[in-house]
Each structure stands twice: as structure tokens, then as C-alpha cells.
């Protein structure tokens, strides 16, 4: 799974994405660009789930001013070779 988040804050802004299933949180930083659609203005990470299942990915961000934002993404991982529902 590839996760891309838009954080329009300076480079100090950070995203923490615990992917569930007992995995460690991932910390990434955005490029801090304030230009819409600027590829350098996004934080990106890739995660591979080890088992099929239903996961809730939590994404947290904090701006340099201390303001926080939290988002959730539902992810369903099928068994290898299984057809998608």
C-alpha cells in the first residue's frame, strides 16, 4: 500500500502512520510546499501488510504551530490470489 498525504506546512511538519497489525509507526516529513499539486509538498511512505485482514490506518499530523490533525483510512487486504470483492 502506498500512502501519500498532503501537509501544507513547513518541512518540520511530520506525519505518523501506525499501519495496524502490530507494526511500528512510520514517521515521514513533507517538503512543506504551499503550492497546490507540488510533488515536493507531500509526505509519502509504502507499507506491505504481512497478513490478509481488515486494518484501520491512522494518520496524524502536527504543524509547526502545534495544531494537530488526525485521519483514518480503512484498508482491506485479501488473501494472495483472491479476487477483490
Image (spheres, rainbow, N blue to C red):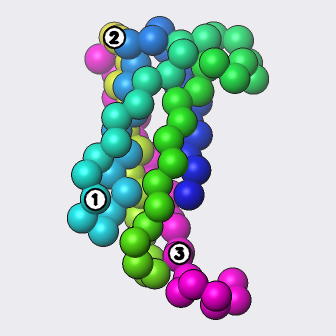
Q: Which residue is mark 1?
A: 23
- Residue 27 is at least partly visible in this image: yes
- Residue 85 is at least partly visible in this image: no
Mark 3 vs mark 1, CA separation in Å:
16 Å
Dot 2: element: loop
Dot 3: element: strand
* Crowding at mark 2 (Cα within 10 Å: few <14, some 14-19, many 20+): few
| Residue at the image position 63 percent from the left and 18 percent from the top | 40
Position of residue 74 measured from the top left corner of the image (x, y, whole percent)? 50, 65
Q: Which residue is mark 2?
A: 65
Residue 8's image quarter? top right
Q: Is residue 47 above or below residue 63?
A: below
* Crowding at mark 1 (Cα within 10 Å: few <14, some 14-19, many 20+): few
Bounds of the magenta span?
A: 66-85
Mark 1 or mark 3, which is nearer the start of the sequence? 1
Dot 1: element: loop
Q: Which mark is residue 76?
A: 3
| Residue at the image position 38 percent from the left and 13 percent from the top | 12
In the image, taking residue 11 as reference, residue 20 lies left or right, namely left
> Marks 3 and 2: CB-CB under 8 Å?
no
Residue 6's image quarter? top right
Please identify the quadrant where the N terminus is shown. bottom right
Magenta span includes 76: yes
> Marks 1 and 2: CB-CB under 8 Å?
no
Amino acid at each position: 500500500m502506498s500512502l501519500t498525504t498532503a501537509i501544507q506546512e513547513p518541512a518540520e511538519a511530520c506525519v505518523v502512520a501506525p499501519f495496524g497489525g502490530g507494526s511500528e509507526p512510520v514517521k515521514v516529513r513533507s517538503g512543506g510546499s504551499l503550492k497546490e499539486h507540488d510533488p515536493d509538498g507531500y509526505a509519502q511512505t509504502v507499507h506491505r501488510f504481512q497478513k490478509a485482514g481488515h486494518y484501520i490506518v491512522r494518520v496524524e499530523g502536527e504543524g509547526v504551530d502545534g495544531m494537530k490533525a488526525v485521519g483514518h483510512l480503512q484498508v482491506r487486504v485479501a488473501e494472495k490470489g483472491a479476487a477483490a470483492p
